[in-house]
Amino acid sequence: IIDKFSPVIEDGFHAMDRAKVKIHHPFKKAYFHAFMLAWFAYDPVSLEAAKDALRVKGALEEEIEYNMYFNADWFHKCVKRRVLPPAQLYWRVRAVYAVYGTKVDPSDGLPLFNKTAWSKANNVLLEIIKGHCSDPPGFDFYHQKLTKRGEPAFNSLGLPLLECSRGTNLTECVHKQIMATFGSWVTGVEMGDA
């Protein structure tokens, strides 16, 4: 796999959500958590700083690991992550599909992935190979949040609170403005000069 990068990046949530899985499948949570860890690589320096802050507070290693699984959002607010280059990302995501896609629900005997989910998963792998998913080299999507007074924001442990400009949430307000300005989602750059 040759590392290629695109200026337009696939949103991690949308990639994760493409292969639809049964809501009550016993491996659903483990699959999504493994996919998240495969897609987003934690920055080792900021992750260790977050773990150290929890240790100082008295958290045991088992509690930290528990929170990384069941309270991952806390870490996402103060630990940088990046989407690895295609040559690394492909194998990580493919491994998650291989491990979890065939996991069977004992209540009905059905695997986590049906035929449609496998097709969607293969499409995600193709997007990874094309370079539509990885963060461009040298680009940092994170900046420290500011308080209402414009000062740097920190959590209760003194860690900087981060905002990430990767993904679709940042662009949703632009979509709303386009709809209000042009009265339609079907628009292009040409209409801006009309």
Image: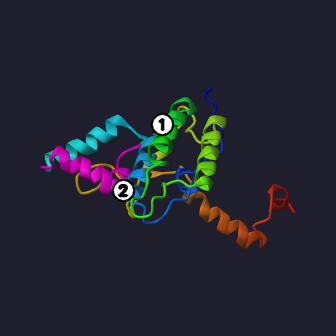
Secondary-structure class at tag 2: helix
> Reading the chain from its start, which is encountered first: label 2 or label 1?
2
Across and down, in percent, residue 184 comes to 77, 70
- Quadrant location, the C terminus: bottom right
Q: Residue furthest front?
A: 109
Q: Tell which of 162 and 50 is nearer to you.
A: 50
Q: Please give left or right for residue 158 compared with residue 104 in the image.
A: left
Return the x and y of residue 127 as percentages of the image width and height: 64, 42
Assign a secondary structure to mark 1: helix
Residue 33 spot, x, y in % from top left = 40, 51
Q: Name the chief secondary structure element in magenta.
A: helix
Q: Is residue 77 above or below residue 89?
A: below
Which quadrant does the N terminus fall into?
top right
Measured as percent of width and height from the top left, residue 32 is found at 44, 53
Label of residue 92 in the image? 1
Single out the residue that lies furthest toward the left.
Answer: 58
Depth order, front residue of 68/103? 103
Q: Which numbered disc covers residue 73? A: 2
Residue drawn at x 27%, y 45% is 50
Q: Is residue 173 above or below residue 161?
A: below
Q: Amino acid at mark 1?
A: Arg
Q: Is residue 65 magenta?
A: yes
| Residue 65, placed above or below residue 177 | above
Tell me which residue sits at (34%, 53%) in the image: 72
Q: Which region is colored magenta?
A: 58-80
Task: Name the residue rendered at 52%, 39% in the picture.
Answer: 94
How many residues crowd around disc 1 within 10 Å: few (fewer than 14), some, or many (20 or more)?
Answer: some
